[in-house]
Amino acid sequence: MWELDSAEGHRGRVGVLLPDGTVPGPVHYDIGSGATFHKSTDWHIYDGTLGAPRAERMRGACACGWFGEDTYPIEWDKVSRREPYRYDITGPQEDWATHARETAAGAWPIPEDLVDLIARLRARVDELEHGDILAGLRVIGELDLIIACSGGYFARAATGRYPDDEIAQALGSTEQALTTRLRRYDRGYY
């Protein structure tokens, strides 16, 4: 799965299409004794072996339900059964990254003075990772206090005023990720 920091919950992956243009369901495997079956939707599983359908094309896909319009042929003779991750999936990945960036760009704007402040804070914390670890931990503690003091207020105020889908869009998030985030803020778990 692919993720961008600025598009919470928008986890990308390679989606596949069968020759008739349909999206296959998960492939189920009986791995031995027991009542449960393993299932997978990894793109390379759809190679036509072990009862799996054979996919013809791939495209970008996102946990939010988005699918890329562009599709790319799968050349199964070039896909290593042992190392499918070596196969070129840059087309679907770049399409998803564009979707995730567009989602993040459509989020509610952060005040300009805070954009600069947050960027400088991130850069400085990154520097501390390679130097003063205890100072870095202290900074993270201060950020935790800000969230603990203000997170619950903003979560309750937003949910009292806006529907979840609008809040999720404003944050560049999915509704599922939003629910987790708001619960964490409201209860002080972060």
Image (spheres, helix red, strand yellow):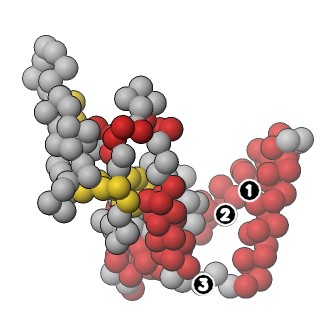
Q: Residue 123's mark? A: none
Q: Where is residue 148 in the image (x, y as percent from the top left)?
A: 59, 60
Q: Is mark 2 on a helix, strand or loop?
A: helix
Q: In this view, does 152 lie above or below 169?
A: above
- Left or right placement of residue 73 versus residue 46 in this view: right
Identify the mark nearer the N-term, 1 or 3: 3
Identify the mark nearer the N-term, 3 or 2: 3
Nearer the viewer's eye, disc 1 or disc 3? 3
Q: Tag count in the figure?
A: 3
- Mark 2 — residue? 146
Front position in the image: 129 or 83: 83
Alpha-carbon span between mark 1 and mark 2 = 6 Å
Farthest residue to the top: give it: 33
CB under 8 Å between callouts 1 and 2?
yes
- Mark 3 — residue? 109
- Left or right placement of residue 163 versus residue 130 in this view: left
Instruction: Inspect the image, locate mark 2, and give the three-letter code of the amino acid beneath it.
Output: Ile
Q: Is mark 3 on a helix, strand or loop?
A: loop
Q: Is mark 1 on a helix, strand or loop?
A: helix
Please tell me which residue is depicted at 24% across the width and 49% down the height of the picture.
Answer: 55
Please tell me which residue is depicted at 78% across the width and 76% down the height of the picture.
Answer: 116
Please tell me which residue is depicted at 64% across the width and 81% down the height of the picture.
Answer: 110
Instruction: Inspect the image, locate mark 3, and give the three-letter code of the amino acid beneath it.
Output: Pro
Alpha-carbon span between mark 1 and mark 3 = 24 Å
CB under 8 Å between callouts 3 and 2?
no
Instruction: Inspect the image, locate mark 1, and give the three-letter code of the amino acid beneath it.
Output: Glu
Q: Is residue 129 above or below residue 118?
A: above
Please tell me which residue is depicted at 76% across the width and 68% down the height of the picture.
Answer: 119
- Mark 1 — residue? 142
